Each structure stands twice: as C-alpha cells, then as structure tokens.
Amino acid sequence: MEVSFYLRKELLNKNGLAPIRMHITFNGQLIKKSIKGVNTKPDQWKDKRMRIRANYKTEEYNFHVEYNQILDDLEERIRDIERYALLNKVELTKEFILDKLEQKQKINIEHDFFDTFNEYIESQKPISAKNTTKGRITVRNFLKDFSSYTGKQLLLDNIDISFFEEFRKYSYEQKNINNNYFSKIISILKTFMTWASDREYHNNHKYLKFNAPEEEIEVICLTPDELLMLYNFEFESDRLDKTRDLYCFGCFTGLRFSDLRNLAKSSLYKDYLKGNIIKTKNKDHFVPLNKYSIAILDKYKNTPFQPIPIISSQNANKYIKECCKIVGIDTITTITRYKGSVRQDETRPKYGFITMHTGRKTFATVSLILGMGERFVKSITGHKRDSSFRRYVKFSQQDIQKQMENTWDKL
C-alpha cells in the first residue's frame, strides 16, 4: 500500500486556502479521500515532502505542526491497516480500508481472536468450575465452526452487529440451536470481549449492543405422586435400582448431579449434609435431610457404594428414562422451543423428557407445592437468580390451581 497527499489547488476558498486529499494505492486500485479540516495556501505546500511548511513570510500562524501531525497519523494508520491485514490473513478491499480508517480507536495488530480466546479460557480456569470451563471451550469451538463454514475471519475488531446477524442466522439455520442456547453463547462471547477489552487488546465495544434474551421454558419435573411412585417401585434390575436411588436423592435434596457425584462420606451428618457446590463454589452448603434421603443413605451404608451410587451422566440420563417408563410416568407432554421466530413443539411421553437435572427441579417444585417457604427452598437449592427460581413458583401455583379444579369438580 502506498500513501500520497496532494494539494487541490483548483479548490481554493475565499481565504486562498486549498484542501488536501489522500491517495491510497493497493493491488492496482486507488482510493481518494479528502482530509477534513486540513488546508493550506499553495505557496506553503511542499510537493516533494507532501507536507505543509512553516509560514515564514508573515507572523500569521498556519497550523503546520498540527496539520502535518494529522497527515503523519493517517500515514501511520495506513501502515497499521496493512500489517493488520497481513497478520490476520485479511484480503485488502476498499471497503475494509475505509472502515478501518473510520474507526477512531487504535487498530489491534497483535492479538489473534482464537489465541486470545484460549488465553481467556486458561486465565479463568483457576477460578471457574469444570463445567464452566467446558462451556467456554464449546463456545470457542462453535465460533471456529462458524468461521470455517462462512470463510469469515474473526477479529477482535469485527465483532459487530453485522457479525452478530450473520452468526445468529448460522446458529439457527445451520446448527439448528434454540434461542436459549444462542443466548448462552452470546453471553459467553460478550464476557470474553469485555475481558479482552479490560486488557486493552481491543477498543471495539459494538458487541455491547448484542441482544439475545433468554426465553422462559417449561419446568419438567415429577409430581409428588410420580416421585413417590418411582421411589417405592421395586426394580428387578440392580442397574435401574441404583439409578433410581441416585435420582431420587437429588429429588429429596435439590443437589445438582455434579454435586451428587462428588458427595463424600465426610459431608454427611445425622440429619443434614454439608458440601462444596461445584457450580457456584459455595463452601459448606447446608442441606437438611428428610426421611426419604436418609433412607437412601442408610441403604448404602457400609457398602462399596457409600454414600450413594455413582453413575456417569450419559448412562444416568439414559437409565432414568428407562426407570420412569417402567414405572408408568408416561403422561403425554409437550415442550415448546423457538429457533429465531420459528416455533417448534415436541410431544412425547413424559419419561422421554426426564433427565438427572429434573431431580433438582422436582425438589424445588414439590417443596413449594407442599408448602415450604420460597426463601427456605432457595436456601437449600442455592438459587441466586430470582428469574430462574420464579419458574418453580409459577409452576407450583399452576399445579395448586389444577388440584383445586380437580377436587371441586367432583362436587
């Protein structure tokens, strides 16, 4: 890329001042750009140096220092744009060059997008739960797939509204993800971009305008009757028996599956347990035990499975569906998800939607239905966001209304 400055003598104003125009040549192409606010008299312009000389003929100051600095800065900016394009393997186009010239912030030359994302992941590992780190890696890989599929080079400086719209279209149409998963990806991306901005890796803040709100989704959980039916069922299979106990223990304590798998004997006391919550890193989290959870612990006392059986998440989610199917938890259930503006309904027997995480949802919902106060339920589950917890309150109110109707309809 070559940069030249020319005085447009044919455009003298009434004060005898002519404007200056910049020429940028690259790949046989020419960009002409007027330099706003920079002008001088023809006899004060030096063609060979392409700069303004000091006004020695009169005492009137001609701003040659300030104007020449503007020209120097523009020339340096063109050099930065060229280096940026070479380092990031970006094709030089008229649109690209003009866009970079319009940006007021300093151009980021050194920091590759994915190298920086890797740095972000590694820097957060010591203070993040394992699953949180795993989620960031998944988002990084998702962005890599987008870049590969579209041929779009991701740069810290081009994460803007245009990127957002193209990425959203790719996510819905090619990856077929729903709105809430897209919202999670955008949340992680924005957190990463803020982290990079705090370290002065870029000055691009267009990403702050990205808007991908979560949608409220149905609460899939067991009713009190279904829970007791599952708890009391006698399975012939030892595999299913252990899966049921692990799941029901989650239903009776509100613990996440990750915390169930990390439960230690040292965490157990007579009528409560204390443990470290992996996701929120809450130490010595207090969970009271009821007669059902105590009975499950007693069942495995002094066995190789103490305190409770451990099953991989993949197998546990598979086996608990099998358990619920055998028990007869098969009410036809429909869930609704949106992918962009497209509504997608999925209908199947209820056991097809049951996963280990629904145990925690079952605890919260059943506790509210049975009359436990909201703040006590939140204390046990460790919910920090009201928006997440309010779904259970709403669900329990609907269930109470249904019970009222079913009862009084018999009158």
Image: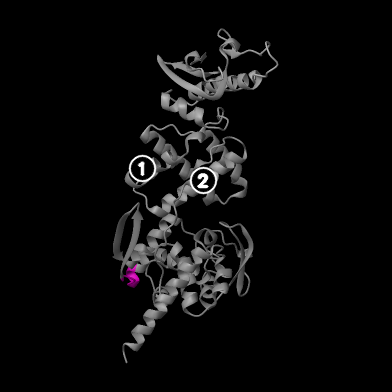
Left or right of residue 61, residue 140 in this image: left
Residue type at numbered disc 1:
Tyr
Q: Nearer the observer, disc 1 or disc 2?
A: 2
Question: Which stretch appears magenta?
Answer: 325-331
Magenta span includes 326: yes
The total number of labels drawn is 2
103 up-or-down from 174: above or below: above
The kind of secondary structure element at disc 1 is: helix
Which of these two is toward me, 200 or 375?
200
Left or right of residue 267, residue 404 in this image: left
- In the displayed image of the protein, which residue is found farthest to the top? 48
* Quarter of the image where one finds residue 197: top right
Q: Where is residue 39 in the image (x, y as percent from the top left)?
A: 56, 20
- Residue that carries the numbered disc 1 in the rendered image: 170
Name the residue: 49% across, 33% down: 155
257 up-or-down from 32: above or below: below
- Residue that carries the numbered disc 2 in the rendered image: 208
Label 1 crowd (10 A; few <14 / some 14-19 / many >=20): some
